[in-house]
Image: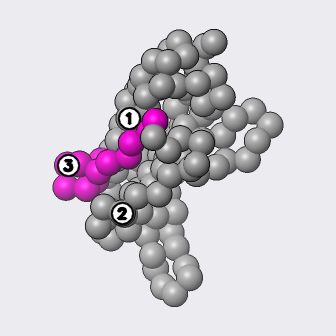
Amino acid sequence: QVQLVESGGGLVQAGGSLRLSCAASGSTFRLNDMGWYRQAPGKQRDLVATITSGGSTNYADSVKGRFTVSRVNAKNTVLLQMNSLKPEDTAVYYCYAGRKTGWGTWDDFWGQGTQVTVSS
């Protein structure tokens, strides 16, 4: 039982910045990965950025150099700093947490999603 609570979405102009925050609670034992995915209308949910408990990060090519993911508060909170936002960044952003349960098996948890809209 893991609960993920997101905040920080909103409406910004192109070139602006937002910071998303996600706090995990409940059974947070060995949340190996945390991060963010996004889903635009008519598209599948895709990776934005993830970070492991050891601090290794992974970014989608489309956000490299603009977005930064980090973990704070005993690694149970994940942040996404989004700079130089573009209209194509408009999507619902979902917080993600993953826990490895065995070889090739995972438990995954999702937040409710927060809307990010970037106007041109």
Q: Which mark is residue 73?
A: 3
- Label 3 packing within 10 angstroms: few (<14), some (14-19), many (20+): few
Going by the numbered disc 3, the residue's amino acid type is Asn
Residue reaching furthest front?
Answer: 65
Residue reaching furthest left?
Answer: 74
Q: Position of residue 18 (x, y in %)?
A: 41, 25
Q: Is residue 106 visible?
A: yes
Q: Quadrant of the N terminus?
A: bottom left
Going by the numbered disc 2, the residue's amino acid type is Ser
User: Residue at coordinates 29% horizontally, 67% vertically from top-left?
Assistant: 54
Asked whether 63 falls inside the magenta stretch, the response is no
- Label 1 packing within 10 angstroms: few (<14), some (14-19), many (20+): some
Q: Between tags 2 and 3, which lies in front?
A: 2
> What residue span does the magenta drawing correspond to?
66-77
Q: Position of residue 22 (x, y in %)?
A: 37, 42
Q: Which residue is mark 2?
A: 56
